[in-house]
Image: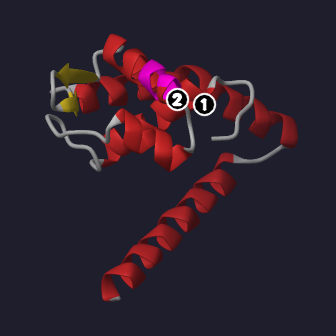
Amino acid sequence: MNDNAIPIYLQLAERLCDEIVKGRYPENGRIPSVRDLAVTYELNNITVLHTFDALERRGLIFKRRGEGYFVKEGAVKILAKSRKERFYNELLPQLFYDMETLGIPIDEVARKYEEYLNSKSLTQNEEEQK
């Protein structure tokens, strides 16, 4: 967590959202406790509670009294939808602007994307062989 412009509790919320989308914390599955996350990320318990409050307000997690916090059914769908909207409405227009400004053709970007996918695939294959 390092982006000083974004509050730490929101940085942690985004990190947890990443883990939910990736399946590390499946829907209806338990997420780490406030105490565990505070220790892991060297944060105050109150900061982690703010994170959980933010995720609860977004409809992504819920609390079971005495058991902890769990990923809500449908959280992945909610996250995918909001992230796609952000990608198309914010990130892609900025990318297009930068490409135009720097004179980067789309085929060069496509080639770089293919290189990225290939390197990712090679890394996954290496990890599977270990």
Mark 1 crowdedness (10 Å alpha carbons): few <14, some 14-19, many ≥20: few
Instruction: Compare marks 2 and 1 and give the one earlier in the sequence.
Output: 2
Helix, strand or loop at disc 1? helix
Name the residue type under label 1.
Answer: Leu
In the image, 86 versus 35, the foreground residue is 35
Q: Which residues are magenta?
A: 46-50
Image quadrant in which the N terminus is located? top right
**30 above or below 63?**
below
Percent coordinates x, y for residue 11 in the rendering: 56, 32
Q: Nearer the viewer, residue 99 or 85?
A: 85
In-image side of 13 versus 27 (left or right): right
Q: Residue furthest top?
A: 57
**Residue 82 percent location from the top left of the image:** 41, 22
Which quadrant holds the C terminus? bottom left
Residue 36's place in the image compared with 79, above or below, is below
Q: Which residue is tagged 2?
A: 87
In the figure, residue 83 lies in which quadrant?
A: top left
Dominant secondary structure of the residues highlighted in magenta in the image: helix
Give the image's coloring scheme.
Answer: secondary structure
Residue 92's disc number: 1
Determine if residue 18 is in view: no
Res 69 visible: yes
The residue positioned 26% from the left and 44% from the top of the image is: 25
Q: Who's the residue at 42% across and 16% down the image?
A: 54
Q: Are marks 2 and 1 in contact (CB under 8 Å)?
A: yes
Locate residue 78 relative to residue 109 in the image: left or right. left
Q: Quadrant of residue 35?
A: top left
Q: Is residue 32 magenta?
A: no
Q: x, y percentage for residue 12?
A: 51, 34
The amino acid on which the numbered mark 2 sits, given as a three-letter code, is Phe
**In the rendering, at what x and y percent does residue 85 appear?**
45, 21
